[in-house]
Amino acid sequence: DRRNRRKVYESVFCIVQRDMKRAAELLLEGVATFTCVELCTYERFIFYAVVTNLLSLPRPLIKKKIVDGPDILQVIEQVPHLRELVTSFHECEYARVMRAMAGISDELLADRYLAQHARYLVREMRVLAYSQFLDAYKSVLLANMAAVFGVGVEFLDKELARFSASGRLNAKVDKVGGMVETN
């Protein structure tokens, strides 16, 4: 019991320190044995586990451990927009991902541990969604990509340009041709 409690406390410390990868590992290990109710509720613990693991796990493991995880399935409906975020991300329904992220960002801002990292987490989820989408294409029309994501062309253009300039996306935006080309 002490070991399990230590993992929960350490995972929350990692969240506060923005070490999301380590927090994700610890949170996933503690899902079945959570007893640390003085720190947070089980629903909030599952919220932490899902959000951090969405950023750190590859898609096949997201399916296995998050989407089909029995302990997570019991609670995921109690957190608004969380199930929609996970399933739409896994099923590549990017317009739903963007809508769910808008709802989740309110949850992140209201949380005492994740509030300071809310912008970072939403930005990382968007980078992940853009990367996942662009991995399937050599080039795609900017207007088509904007339609798939349910956002405006100008917004997507600025966002992709910022992420590719900072080295976060392996893509170039051709504004004149209206194309996004992957490297």
Image: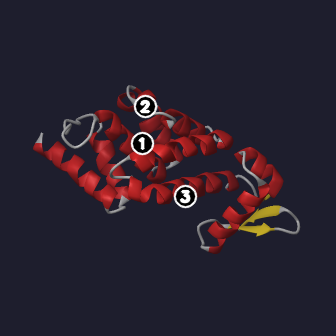
Q: Nearer the viewer, residue 111 or 84?
A: 111
Q: Residue furthest top?
A: 74
Residue at image position (30%, 58%) is: 14
User: The C terminus appears in which quarter of the rendering?
Assistant: bottom right
User: The N terminus appears in which quarter of the rendering?
Assistant: top left
Residue corresponding to mark 2: 76
Kind of residue indicated by mark 1: Val
Residue corresponding to mark 1: 50
Q: Position of residue 158 (x, y in %)?
A: 71, 65
| Quarter occupied by residue 153 | bottom right
Q: Residues within 10 Å of mark 2 (few under 14, many from 20)?
A: many
Relative height, residue 164 to residue 84 (above, below) = below
Q: Sequence order check: which comes first, mark 3 or mark 2? A: 2
Q: Nearer the viewer, residue 9 or 140?
A: 9
Relative height, residue 113 to residue 178 (above, below) = above
| Quarter occupied by residue 88 | top right
Relative height, residue 164 to residue 83 (above, below) = below
* Numbered disc in front, either 3 or 1: 3
Q: In the rendered structure, are the residues bearing label 3 and label 1 in contact, judged by CB atoms less than 8 Å apart?
A: no
Residue corresponding to mark 3: 123
> From the viewer's perspective, is 2 left or right of 34?
left
Q: Position of residue 116 (x, y in %)?
A: 39, 59
Q: Residues within 10 Å of mark 1 (few under 14, many from 20)?
A: many
Tell me the distance, in whole angstroms, between the alpha carbons under discs 3 and 1: 16 Å
> From the viewer's perspective, is 29 left or right of 164?
left
Tell me the distance, in whole angstroms, between the alpha carbons under discs 1 and 2: 9 Å
Q: In the rendered structure, are the residues bearing label 1 and label 2 in contact, judged by CB atoms less than 8 Å apart?
A: yes
Q: Sequence order check: which comes first, mark 1 or mark 2? A: 1
Query: What kind of element bears circle 2?
Result: helix
Determine if residue 141 is in view.
no
Q: Position of residue 106 (x, y in %)?
A: 49, 45
